[in-house]
Image (spheres, grey):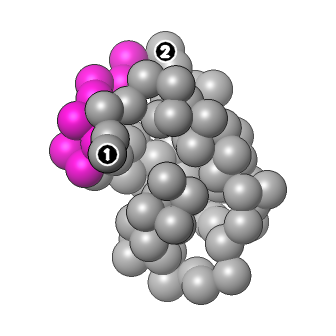
Amino acid sequence: MFEQIKSILEQYTGITDITEQSILEADLGLSSFDVVEIVSEFEDVFGIEIADRDITKFVCVKDIVDYLEAYGKYE
């Protein structure tokens, strides 16, 4: 799960040393608009719809991993 998320984030940011503790805005330089775009990609890849109110809970990569593991449909 983390590796798939990391791969998507690498495509958007060009940063390769992403960890679960990487902070989306501070470490990866993502704006709130960027996060919304990336969440759309997560929705497609993982077969899930993420509510706007939940997006605001994504501060670091681990928040995304935990959310998708709890709510995603993945193999």
Q: CA distance from mark 2 to mark 1?
A: 26 Å
Q: Magenta span has 5?
A: no
Q: Position of residue 6 (x, y in %)?
A: 52, 66
Which type of secondary structure does the marked residue at label 2 adopt? helix
Residue at 51%, 34% (x, y): give it: 69
- Determine if residue 73 is in view: yes
Part of the protein shown in magenta: 43-51
User: At 68% from the left edge and 82% from the top edge, which residue is drawn?
Assistant: 17
Neighbours of disc 1 within 10 Å: few (<14), some (14-19), many (20+): few
Left or right position of 41 against 9? left
Mark 2 or 1, closer to the camera: 1
Which quadrant is home to the C terminus? top left
State the image quarter where residue 28 is shown. bottom right
Which residue in the protein does label 1 denote? 75
Q: Is residue 71 above or below residue 75?
A: above
| Residue at image mark 2 | 53
Q: Residue drawn at (72%, 57%), measured in percent from left and top?
A: 20
- Which numbered disc flags the more N-terminal residue, 2 or 1? 2
Q: Is residue 40 visible?
A: no
Disc 2 marks a residue whose amino acid type is: Arg
**Image-based side of 68 in relation to 15, left or right:** left
Indicate the position of residue 65 as horizontal and vertical percent values.
58, 43
Residue 4 appears at what percent x and percent y?
A: 43, 63
Tell me the amino acid under the disc marked 1.
Answer: Glu
